Image (cartoon, grey):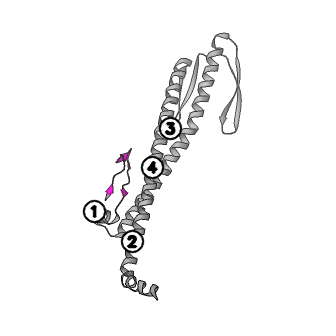
Amino acid sequence: MSTSASATERRGIPAAAFVEDVQTYLSQLNLDVNSALAFLQERLQQYRVVEMKLLAQQRDLQAKIPDIEKCLDVVATLQAKKGTNEAIIADYEVSEGIYSRARVEDMGSVCLWLGANVMLEYSCEEATTLLQKNLENAKASLEVLVADLQFLRDQVTITQVTIARVYNWDVHQRRLRQGSPAASESPAASES
């Protein structure tokens, strides 16, 4: 009999069923061994595709978090120098590998790149609030993503074990069918 995993689905990722009794599993699904193996292999491939997407999202978030933290540090530095009337000389990246030097005198506002060719000007306080919110959201998303990846890895393992159990059950059944006459002859052969 097959038993369901602890969760039936997690954020669109279907749970794999652990198969205790292969014969009951096959009869419940009304499948032969080859069809069941094909279904399980297809499910395994689907899990692999989802895993690739989740890993890409994880890499993006892991790169985004340090960028947000760096922006928070820059805004904090600007806020610290705000009342001193002291100019800051800063090197900044214009594009990849190209830097320029700037003299920043008015530190009352900052421009934040929001993506999709959009940049908005914020006061330092608003920028800090927005960046902290973005950092919290990114960290929370990363935690959910890590949990999703763990759930997915568990489903991959269960599916691989199920494939092995179905295959081994089929091999065992074939040997029983082929070995029935040989099984009755083998004790006589061992006595001589």
Tags 3 and 4 touching, CB below 8 Å: no
Depth order, front residue of 40/106: 40
Residue found farthest to the bottom = 192
Amino acid at the residue labelled 1: Gln
Amino acid at the residue labelled 3: Leu
Magenta segment boundaries in residue numbering: 2-20
For marks 3 and 4 on the same chain, the one whose residue lies earlier in the sequence: 3
The image quarter in which residue 89 lies: top right
Amino acid at the residue labelled 2: Asp
Placement of 80 over or under 167, stated as above or below: above
Give the CA separation, mark 2 to mark 4: 27 Å
Task: Find disc 2 in the rendering and name its residue.
Answer: 170
Depth order, front residue of 138/112: 138
Task: Find disc 3 in the rendering and name its residue.
Answer: 142
Placement of 168 over or under 85, stated as above or below: below
Query: What element does badge 1 sit on?
Result: helix
Task: Find disc 4 in the rendering and name its residue.
Answer: 152
Residue 61, given in percent of the width and then of the height, sits at: 53, 39
Task: Find disc 1 in the rendering and name its residue.
Answer: 28
Query: What element does badge 3 sit on?
Result: helix
Q: Residue drawn 70% across and 33% down?
A: 99
Residue 68, given in percent of the width and then of the height, sits at: 57, 30
Of circles 1 and 4, the one toward us is 1
Crowding near pointer 1: few (<14 within 10 Å), some, many (20+)? few
Q: Residue drawn 37% across and 74% down?
A: 173
For marks 2 and 4 on the same chain, the one whose residue lies earlier in the sequence: 4
Of circles 2 and 4, the one toward us is 2
Please indicate whether residue 28 sits to the left or right of residue 70 in the image.
left
